[in-house]
Image (cartoon, rainbow, N blue to C red):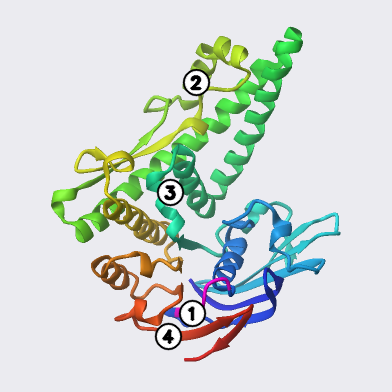
């Protein structure tokens, strides 16, 4: 998979811009707050139909404009795929996604046409943050890889919201309990699919991440990753989910919130047997985050048969020379778009194209 062209119209601080990435590494360099990250955000929008920085699409439209447009031309083994996203403030259809020129009816139809792995300084929260950060990490990549997972996640969130609404309504009207079983069944079916996909993905991620971590940190600081869920291992996940919901029902009714299910899952990340979130040094935590992102590359390539695009948002300056060199060596051959304020941070990397970014304009320098 290779990105051939990116076009932006009234996106963030760009009036109009076009980027022709190199097949290997493309560098976006310039001072802070000039628009480097906005280009990566536009690509992310074409991957998942949403920004990685804000849940509000209107934030992506240039100030004073009514609409924004982003398009990506990507070359796959089976030919060229054109993906575009139009965002509007006024139109009833505030977001229109097109693949190959045809508007898609569901956002899930976008998944897989552009696959990218994004690594940014804030990804340290995968290690340092709470369970929600780690669930989001899993959900973002799995949604790109498997549309079935994305749809199951949508169904689960809808059913979870409906069940929680019903639990709150039951505090005022106990008769509403009659419909609780129906929502439990929907939650259990979608939840079982989510857990099954997550278990498979985390197992593949664990193998790749542990190997990456061993190369960077050495065998003395072995990384281990475990998927933590309330559901039992084996078949019968939906039945087990129903059991958990039934056992927690009285507590859920008192608290008016659903206390069990994959929305409570987590990843346990340990280094040398100790939890990285609590006991890891800053350097160890960075190494774990880097290993997870490098593992994503390998898992996507194994599952898709093509390497994804790698987006590096100002991470080189955050890494020490050894980790920086490990990253450069491992991404050789992967199409990469990297942002930086100082080109010296990329010493040793083969820079195929360099763009200077200034106040929402792109100027190719090399």
Q: Which residue is mark 3?
A: 125
From the top left corner, tell me how far across and down residue 330 is, in percent: 30, 69
Q: Nearer the viewer, mark 2 or mark 1?
A: 1
Instruction: Write down the residue under mark 2.
Output: 239
Q: What residue is disc 1 on?
A: 29
Q: Nearer the viewer, mark 4 or mark 3?
A: 3
- Direction from residue 54 to residue 219 in the image, left or right: left
| Mark 1–mark 3 CB contact (< 8 Å) | no
Earlier-in-chain disc, 4 versus 2: 2
Q: Which mark is residue 352?
A: 4
Q: CA distance from mark 2 to mark 3?
A: 33 Å
Estimate how packed mark 4 is, as few (under 14), some (14 to 19) or many (20 or more) residues with alpha carbons within 10 Å: some
Tag 4 and tag 2, C-beta contact below 8 Å: no
Q: Give coordinates of residue 243: x percent, y percent.
A: 49, 16
Q: Earlier in the sequence, mark 1 or mark 3?
A: 1
In whole angstroms, how far apart are the C-alphas of marks 1 and 3? 25 Å
Residue at mark 4 to residue at mark 3: CA–CA distance? 31 Å
Q: Quadrant of residue 325?
A: bottom left
CB-based contact (under 8 Å), mark 1 and mark 4: no
4 or 3: tag closer to the N-terminus: 3
Residue at point 58% right, 64% down? 41
Pick the front one: 317 or 83: 317
Q: How many marks?
A: 4
Where is residue 340? Give x, y as percent.
45, 74
């Amino acid at each position: 998979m290779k990105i051939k062209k990116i076009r932006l119209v009234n996106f963030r601080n760009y009036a109009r811009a076009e980027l022709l990435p190199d097949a290997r590494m493309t560098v976006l360099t310039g001072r802070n707050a000039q628009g480097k990250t906005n280009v990566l955000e536009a690509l992310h929008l074409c991957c998942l139909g949403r920004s990685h920085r804000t849940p509000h699409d209107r934030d992506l439209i240039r100030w004073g404009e009514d609409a924004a447009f982003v398009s990506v031309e990507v070359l796959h083994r089976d030919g060229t795929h054109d993906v575009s996203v139009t965002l509007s403030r006024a139109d009833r259809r505030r977001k229109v996604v097109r693949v190959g020129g045809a508007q898609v009816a569901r956002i899930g139809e976008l998944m897989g046409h552009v696959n990218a792995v994004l690594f940014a300084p804030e990804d340290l929260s995968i290690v340092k943050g709470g369970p929600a950060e780690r669930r989001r990490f899993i959900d973002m990549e799995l949604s790109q890889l498997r549309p079935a997972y994305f749809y199951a996640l949508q169904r689960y969130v809808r059913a979870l919201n409906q069940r929680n609404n019903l639990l709150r309504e039951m505090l005022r009207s106990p008769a509403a309990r009659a419909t609780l079983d129906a929502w439990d069944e929907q939650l259990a079916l979608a939840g079982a699919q989510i857990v099954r996909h997550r278990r498979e993905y985390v197992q593949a991620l664990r193998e790749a991440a542990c190997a990456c971590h061993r190369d960077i940190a050495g065998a003395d600081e072995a990384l281990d990753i475990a998927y933590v869920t309330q559901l039992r291992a084996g078949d019968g996940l939906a039945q087990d989910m129903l059991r958990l919901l039934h056992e927690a029902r009285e507590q859920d009714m008192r608290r008016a919130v659903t206390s069990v299910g994959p929305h409570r899952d987590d990843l346990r990340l340990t280094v040398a047997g100790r939890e990285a979130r609590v006991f890891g040094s800053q350097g160890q935590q960075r190494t774990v985050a880097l290993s997870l992102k490098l593992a994503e590359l390998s898992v996507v390539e194994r599952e898709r048969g093509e390497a994804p695009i790698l987006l590096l948002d100002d991470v080189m300056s955050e890494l020490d020379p050894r980790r920086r060199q490990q990253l450069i060596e491992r991404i050789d051959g992967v199409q990469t778009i990297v942002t930086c304020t100082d080109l010296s941070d990329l010493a040793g990397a083969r820079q195929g194209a360099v763009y200077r970014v200034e106040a929402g304009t792109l100027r190719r320098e090399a």
